[in-house]
Image (cartoon, coloured by chain):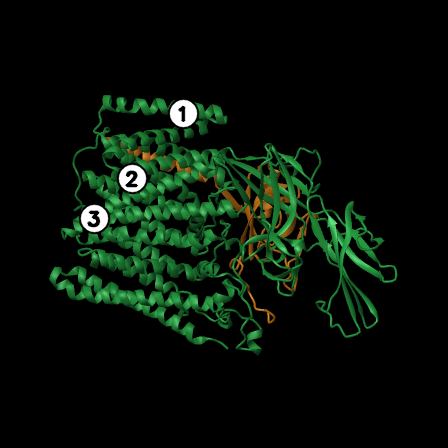
Chain colours: A green, B orange
Amino acid sequence: MIHTLIGDLGHLFVIISLVTALLAAFSYFKAAQKDDLAAEGWKSIGKMFFSFHAIAVLGIVVCLFYIIYGHYFEYHYAWSHSSRQLPTHYMISCFWEGQEGSFLLWMFWHAILGIIVIATNKFWESSVMTVFSLVQAFLASMILGVVIPGLELKLGSSPFILLRDAIDAPIFASQPDFVPKDGTGLNPLLQNYWMVIHPPTLFLGFALCTVPFAYCIGGLWKKRYRDWIRPALPWALVGGAILGLGILMGGYWAYETLNFGGYWNWDPVENAVYVPWLFLIAAIHTMITFRSSETALKASIVLVITTFVLLLYSTFLTRSGILGESSVHSFTDLGLSGQLLIYLLFFTIGAIWLTVIRWKYLPTSEKEASTYSREFWIFIGALVLCMMGFQVLIPTSIPVYNKIVEAFGVVSNLAPPAEQIQFYSKFQLWFAVAVALLSGVGQFFWWKKMDKSQLKNSLIIPVVITLITTMIIILVKNVADPSYIVLLLAGVFTVVANGKIFIDVFRKSPGLSGGAVTHIGVGMILIGIMFSAGYSKVVSLNRTGMLISKESSNEFNSENLLLFVNEPKEMAGYELKYKGERVESESPSMFIKKGDIENTAIPYLVTAKRDIEEDGETVFQKGDTIKIAPENTYYEIQYKDGNNNIFTLYPRAQVNESMGGLLASPDIKRGLGKDLYTHVSSIRSPNEKVEWSEMEEFKVAPDQNFFVNDYVTSINKVERIDQVDGLDLGPEDVAVRIDIIVQGEDDNYLAQPIFVIKDGLVGRISDEIVDLGIKLTVLNIHPDENQFSIGANTRQKNWVVLKAMEKPLINILWSGTLLLMIGFGIAINRRYKEFKKMREKGME
Amino acid sequence: MKASHIIGIVIIAVAIGIIIATAGDASSYVTFNEAQEMAENGNGNSIHVVGELTKDNSGEIIGIEPSPDKLSFSFVMVDDNQKQQRVYYNEPMPADFKRSEKVVVIGSYKDDLFIADKILMKCPSKYQEETVNAEI
């Protein structure tokens, strides 16, 4: 059965949303062109159309989610992004895994923000909503999925396309109504809670950046050159906070889930959000300057427009496939690059044109900014931020230059720098130093009228404290690299200087302390980045003198540890012990030994071989069915430090031959001073053929000990069973399961080989104790002697190769992030109150 | 001279500096032959080569040889000039490798082997299937 109704409904909503967005844009445009009284009619029509538009967007979202949630795999979107066993919260991630879904998410936020703008503004509604509705119309066209007949022009890519229309598979020729039983699932690396909340946060940040832009255009259009900044500022602040939070969440996800050992990779996709964010922060600074001193209006207009254009440019970069050869994210072209380019050019050219024709009317302050004025220093700060962004933008755009010169028939072979991290870091470090120094000094200018002698007086104490603190940190932490010392000095100075300002301001009026708190956060982030990235060190050093593998590089052999199951090893003051492979059960979430479960025909369902306990309580009883995530294997690593404190880490690995290899995720022991970051770098491949030793035979009675691989082993229980998977047992047939206990170093292990006599023939089903590398088989039963013949094969014990790194003071980075957000919160609150006051006076 | 002029000049200087530094640090896309020439001339810079994996007539990828411990592997790549070259990569095979339509290897020649420091892959779309099997 193919559910065509829901898809048709979704598609209908897409068309409605496009049409209503265009109608709303037109009505609001008309309203904005008229004077106040005559505008009311058009304004209410615009409001009506935008409301319909918002309902239609909600409709699209509901339809798409219904398809994913209902497992309607006849739809291409559900089939390629979801699967049956995916928990609900990851179904939400599937929603935006595809490009169509992420455009939809962006539209969704715009619809909500549009409604807030309508509800909170009086004067600005018409002009702002004209811009908003136009942006929405462009986004809606991205998911339209209509081919214009005759022109063969594809407009947008629909998320409601049926699988049989999207993919040309032979099965559809014979069975047009064929529906796959299951989808292909969500990228396992995205099955992480950060990936549930990180994309919506980023897209909310994107959407928020449209608001100041819309106000700016409205201000230029309606010739209210000064007035747009007040309502736009709180929005710009919220945008800066949310976009920044989104970026940092992405970094945190990378730190927690990917094993490149860091949080920032200077990948083009990361750069594409970082650059507009820097410009937005610069814009916020010039807007604040304007609010307090009527200067920097032109700079604010230019920066707000640039931020939005850069945002569209990053959308173009990441979604047009142009980065295909330079980014690991390997985004591809949905055939929308032409459309995206029109989108980009429309708003860029429109905004530049409007700015140019209004430029000469823009009010300027005649007075030359003195080098002792706060405006001057904030302006310099904003310029540094822009240069910082510019430096990232230029190399990231290399593929674009190639495309442009190719259009003129020239072949360009320019490629992005091969060592991205070193390349960007060496520049960004010095910009960061400048930003830190300026934000330290700038705050003093901000709060006091300065001249030469006053500046000296107010700076002397922070400078002395900074020097002493930095000196102590350098000595304690052994910072030796000169450029790191400069960065540390600048970071500490920002924290100290802004700390002093914070204490002064907080006493008088806590509501104004947002700037100081934010800048303290910036200083801490810089210090945290410097230590955690610059002084990250590998601690899993192989001091045994033995190679892990002859084929591997020297670096691999010296920086990794080979751990055999239950064999302790020393590392960086810890005693490490690998305790075996674990799987995670879904409910309750806990780690279960692979040896305690038995696979069933369905990969994600297993049965318990014995009672499974946690903290002394039985969670699963023998025979219970347990739901697990079969692709994930966790490696239990026990750490014991010098004081006999024990903790356990569970680094994760996914082996997926179809994806070509090993996907490892770290586990992190968080400490106040440093994080211990551990991931597996090589594992015993489960799909590889195992080399077993020759079988050794034991003839034993129950409760009689024998030795397998030096482990004390005994038969615990003999049980006749009625059912054996994969066998039809007749009334004459016999199946006996024998529980054999192997006493490991720390734990007992259970094996349950089965002996079957069916139709007079003997069958033997062996069982393996994975961790110890033992396979046991019941060879024969001797009822007269009450004895059993047990065969044992052994192989190399289970092992794992582990890499561990120390990330010093990374928590300063995360706490700085938190302060940054709190600071933004305080500032937003203050600016929103201002806006509300003005609105109550009927000014906005 | 006004302060704003000085700032303007400094900004332009920094911008030009950034562009020059970028051009200086930029790598380049070359073919295997050019890369080999560069290596023979003692130029050890990392460069990008774009190409595809070799496939047999039935579309199966051939020429991938993992090391016994799976910690590194080598494969045969055909560049845009149809030159076949064995590429060695000292890391486990990246996810998605076999599905990639296009591969970019970043590295340099060492004798007759191309040693890749990094591999970028262009996939139809991450984890997206190209065809449907009747069983699933």
- Which residue is disc 3 drawn over? A835
Instruction: Check disc 2 and give the amino acid type.
Output: Gly
User: Percent x, y for residue A93?
Assistant: 46, 58
Please, what is the three-letter code of the amino acid marked with disc 1? Answer: Thr
Label 1 sits on residue:
A469
Left or right of residue A141, residue A454 in this image: left
The residue where tag 2 is placed is A514
**Figure check: A206 above or below A160:** above
Q: Nearer the viewer, residue A306 or A623?
A: A623
Please state which of residues B82 and A733 is positioned toward the viewer in this rendering: A733
Q: Is residue A685 left or right of residue B43?
A: right
Mark nearer the N terminus (3 vs 2): 2
Q: Are marks 1 and 2 on the same chain?
A: yes
Q: Assess disc 2: are there few (<14), some (14-19) or many (≥20) residues with their C-alpha within 10 Å of its C-alpha.
A: many
On screen, residue A840 above or below A146: above
Image location of residue A518, percent across then percent down = 33, 38
Q: Secondary structure at mark 3?
A: helix
